[in-house]
Image: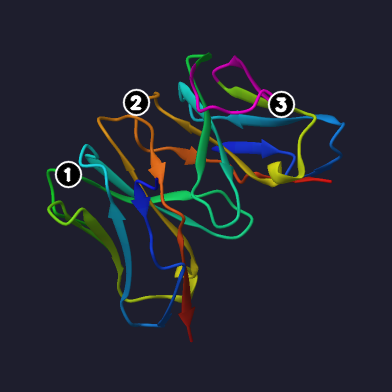
Amino acid sequence: ETGVTQTPRHLVMGMTNKKSLKCEQHLGHNAMYWYKQSAKKPLELMFVYSLEERVENNSVPSRFSPECPNSSHLFLHLHTLQPEDSALYLCASSQDAGYTEAFFGQGTRLTVV
Amino acid sequence: DQQVKQNSPSLSVQEGRISILNCDYTNSMFDYFLWYKKYPAEGPTFLISISSIKDKNEDGRFTVFLNKSAKHLSLHIVPSQPGDSAVYFCAASARRDKIIFGKGTRLHILP
């Protein structure tokens, strides 16, 4: 596979559940990102990882917990989410954290019930 | 406060005509601008970019114009094709920092 791959594509979870979103990139990039896209809002940057180290956390609630075990994989662990967390979660990667052209995955459509 | 604004949520254009998507920004430190295209159920894909040292960049049917004094950029698609129907996101960054996205404009190409 090439590009940025996200799994699952769709996820429905209850507010007491724990789930994880997975992202994998096969582009040899050093930076990976989590974005949130809510209806009628701009894409919101959540986390930035560069060379497996978190370099940015944009005031994201602690119920979202990222993990980057290596430069090709990025996870977003979810626990005790709220219905307003329902959104499209997009993973992206770029050559490095200062590089402006990012490649996106297809996203995970998350519904919290 | 939104730093990148796309004030038209949607736009309908006849096939074969020119589509013009507009974007305004407020941060004068932005020096790199991008357009992304997004189909339903897919992630955004990079379309075209422009550095602040230029005022125009062209790639096939797509041309981006930058007016720094007005803090305005636009994406021109000519001629418009059915496959161009998508959501278009304007984005900007300052000194290769994080990319800030607009809300997007949904483009409908009419037959």
Q: Is residue B95 above or below residue A68?
A: below
Counting from the top left corner in percent of width and height, residue A100 is at 34, 35
Disc 3 on helix, strand or loop? Answer: loop
Q: Residue at x 49, y 30 (%)?
A: A27
- Does any portion of residue B60 appear in the rendered image? no
Q: Amino acid at mark 3?
A: Arg
Q: CA distance from mark 2 to mark 3?
A: 27 Å
Task: Give the numbered dot on residue B52.
Answer: 1
Q: Which residues are magenta?
A: A55-71
Counting from the top left corner in percent of width and height, residue B6 is at 38, 60
Mark 3 belongs to chain = A
Determine if marks 3 and 1 fall on one subunit. Answer: no
**Residue behind mark 2:** A98
- Does any portion of residue A90 appear in the rendered image? yes
Counting from the top left corner in percent of width and height, residue A13 is at 84, 40
**Residue behind mark 3:** A63
Q: Residues within 10 Å of mark 3 (few under 14, many from 20)?
A: some
Q: CA distance from mark 3 to mark 1?
A: 39 Å
Q: Residue at x 50, y 28 (%)?
A: A58
Disc 1 on helix, strand or loop? Answer: loop
